[in-house]
Image (cartoon, rainbow, N blue to C red):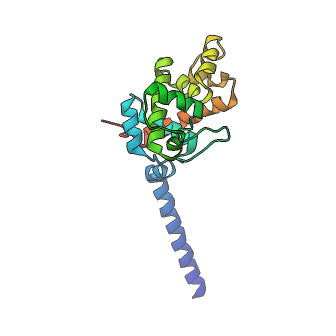
């Protein structure tokens, strides 16, 4: 009798495991949305709309920069959810005409960091003629360095040749942002749709 109970118990557990695995594979979008969430969706959509950016790209940059941690500070001193260097942030605040924006507010308020970072992405978009890959690289390495790479033929600005980017950090940054961008486009097709 005990042996029969153990067999029934094992079969029951096996059925439960199979059902759970089937749910994971058949309903993987909910699992993927759990693994790849987009936090601050309203703030991202508003800022993306303000600067004609793709919200999926903005979300992907935030994911790679801080994984949505608004108070993140890098080893190099970059601040906020979009990890702007303080000097760059000051330049953006001045050029963009932002008022009452401080390093403290960039560090503590995701909405402000997203807005200021979005303005910067728009300026990079304008500078690099909407080449998404170049803009991503410039966001990480700086527009001066990326301009030099393009001018001297080190890199042609295409995804297929991203392995030619001389900085390993920037090369991997571009690859990671594009990975999350594609993931978000697939999982959240209506994100940012007007």
Placement of 118 over or under 144, stated as above or below: below
Residue 182 location (% of width, % of height): 49, 36
Quadrant assignment, res 75: top right
Placement of 59 over or under 170, stated as above or below: below
The front one of 131 and 121 is 121
Residue 2 location (% of width, % of height): 59, 87
Q: Is residue 34 in sight in this rendering?
A: yes
Q: From the image, which quarter does the C terminus lie in?
A: top left
| The furthest residue to the left | 194
Which residue is drawn at the image coordinates 47% and 63% (left, top)? 19
The front one of 153 and 179 is 153
Which residue is drawn at the image coordinates 53% and 65% (left, top)? 17
Which residue is drawn at the image coordinates 38% and 44% (left, top)? 42
Quadrant assignment, res 188: top left
Which residue is drawn at the image coordinates 60% and 25% (left, top)? 142
The front one of 176 and 65 is 65
Q: From the image, which quarter does the N terminus lie in?
A: bottom right
């Amino acid at each position: 009798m005990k042996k029969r109970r153990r067999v029934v118990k094992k079969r029951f557990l096996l059925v439960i495991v199979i059902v759970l695995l089937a749910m994971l594979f058949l309903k993987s979008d909910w699992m993927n949305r759990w693994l790849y969430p987009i936090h601050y969706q309203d703030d991202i959509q508003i800022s993306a709309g303000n600067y004609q950016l793709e919200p999926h790209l903005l979300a992907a940059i935030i994911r790679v920069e801080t994984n949505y941690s608004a108070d993140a500070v890098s080893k190099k001193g970059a601040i906020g959810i979009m990890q702007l260097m303080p000097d760059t942030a000051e330049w953006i605040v001045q050029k963009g005409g932002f008022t009452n924006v401080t390093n403290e507010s960039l560090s503590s308020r995701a909405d402000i960091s997203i807005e200021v970072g979005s303005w910067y992405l728009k300026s990079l978009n304008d500078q690099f003629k909407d080449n998404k890959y170049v803009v991503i690289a410039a966001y990480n390495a700086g527009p001066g360095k990326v301009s030099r790479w393009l001018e001297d033929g080190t890199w042609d600005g295409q995804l297929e040749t991203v392995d030619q980017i001389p900085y390993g950090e920037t090369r991997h940054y571009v690859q990671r942002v594009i990975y999350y961008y594609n993931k978000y486009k697939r999982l959240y097709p209506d994100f940012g749709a007007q």
